[in-house]
Structures are given as structure tokens and as C-alpha cells.
Amino acid sequence: MRKIEALQREVVACTRCPRLRSYCEEVARKKRRAYRDWDYWARPVPSFGDPGARLLLIGLAPAAHGANRTGRMFTGDRSGDFLYRVLHRAGFASQPQAVSRDDGLELRDCYITAAVRCAPPANKPSREEIANCRPFLERELELLRRLRVVVALGRLAFDVYLSILRDQGRIRSRAAFQFAHNRLQPAVEGAPALISSYHPSQQNTQTGRLTEPMLAAVFNQARRLIRPRG
């Protein structure tokens, strides 16, 4: 627990990506009218959840007026509204709403992180920015020792996670791993099971590319894989 907390303090203090830091601070100064009374977080967003989790969710990056405002992953935006409703029904979240860091939400047997910890312009971090942030995810994977399942939300998170497995020598190539929604990927010795999923972005949810039953199927599969505690 202490090591995970110390790591998240490092995340919050990170200044490795000047472009992202500048953008997050600019968004916090300008704000949206709906959030003009908010004191934006405007720093790298730490991961959060159950340190004994067997399920890990990897997202893309904080939303400019979502987690960059609230300071908690998938909190304060429509992607989070969609995600937490499904997590709550699956038993991984204590409530279906996520509006602020102080709203009482707790994750159960679940931990949420992201490939990039700062909101990027147009939701498109550069390769260098992704590489700068990757060590935080690598260390989380080492510290979360009970993990049984990783759910990669979106292709970018999928690619980053596979790049870690490749560089660790756990896989030789990515040829056997094909991104698709609710696909259980080939087993990797010594690593959690990997499920790929569409990201709950507005672009996906508003067009019907991703529906709540489709995302629920991902977490139902994850639940079957991790099995009940005991």
C-alpha cells in the first residue's frame, strides 16, 4: 500500500512532458462555463482503486474537463458516467456515479490506471509522451501483485500494455494479439489474462459502437476469470 501511494505521489509531481503540462494548465485557466466555479486539478492524474485488486483497467488519458478537472480517473465526464454504471452493476464499484474525488466512490477488487496521466490535446499524446509515462504503468504492474485480469480500454492502452510485455521478454511479437471488443487475448506465462475492449469514449457510446451491454460483457468475462475470493 505504501509503495503504491508513494508511486502516485510521483505521478502527481511529474513534469516530464512540457506540452502536456502546459495544456492541462491552460485548460484549467480557461475552463468551461459549466465548471467556472471549479478549482481544476490540472496536474498528472494518479491511479486509484483497491491495492489488492485482481482486475486492472487501463484507459487512454485523462479528459481535459473530466479527470484533469476532478483529479480522479474517469471522473466528471461522460466516459466515466458510462463506465462506472457498468462497473457498479458488475460489483466492481460501490456506486454508479463519479463526480469528484470526495464523492465516496470506492473500487472493489479493481484498480484503474491509464497509459498517459495528463490530458493531451485532442486526446492524442505523442509517442515520446507515451514513452515518458510508461514506467509508471510498469511499476504499477509490479506492485499490484494479485492481478488476474487486465482490461485494456481502447487500442492505445492495448498497444502500450503489449509493448511492456514485449520489452519484458514475455512475448516475442504482437502477431498473435489482435485488438477487438471483448476479446480474450492469448495467454502469456506469468502475466494476467488480457481482455481488449472498446474505450467508453463519447465517440463510441453516442454512435452505438459501444453499448452498456457490450461493456458489461467485458466485466462479466473478467469476473469469470478472476473467480470469487477465497
Image: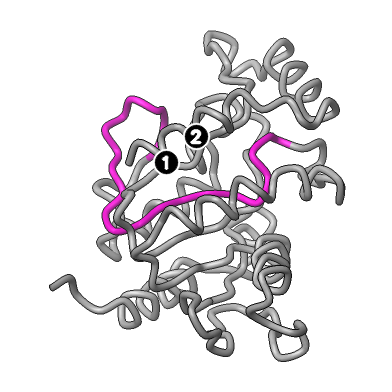
Residue 36 against residue 89 in the figure, above or below = above
- The reply to whether dot 2 and dot 1 touch (C-beta < 8 Å) is yes
User: Compared to 153, does 149 lie above or below?
Assistant: below
Mark 2 to mark 1 CA distance (whole Å): 6 Å
Residue extent of the magenta highlight: 98-119
| Residue 174 image offset from top left, x and y in percent | 75, 82
Q: Point out the image quarter for the C terminus.
A: bottom left
Seen from the viewer's position, the closer of residues 132 and 42 is: 132
Q: Which residue is mark 2?
A: 8
Q: Residue 147 location, x and y as percent?
A: 39, 66
**Could you say where residue 182 lies in the image, as x and y percent from the top left?**
53, 80
The structure residue drawn at horizontal position 66% and vertical position 61%, both measured from the top left corner, is 157
Callout 1 amino acid? Ile
**In terms of image quadrants, where is residue 156?**
bottom right
Q: Tell whether 190 sits left or right of 85.
A: right
Q: For the point 45% across and 46% down, which residue is it? A: 81
Residue drawn where x is 74% and y is 84% of the image? 172
Residue at left 39%, top 28%?
Answer: 101
Helix, strand or loop status at disc 1: helix
Judge left or right: residue 191 versus residue 121.
left
Q: Counting other residues with Cα less than 10 Å from the Cα at mark 1, is it few (<14), some (14-19), or many (20 or more)? A: some
**Where does residue 144 sit, x and y in percent of width and height?**
41, 56
Tally of numbered discs: 2
Amino acid type of the residue tagged 2 in the rendering: Gln
Quarter occupied by the N terminus = top left
In the image, residue 66 lies in the stretch drawn in magenta: no
Q: Nearer the viewer, residue 87 or 116?
A: 116
Q: Secondary structure at mark 2?
A: helix
Q: Quadrant of residue 197?
A: bottom right
Residue under label 1: 4
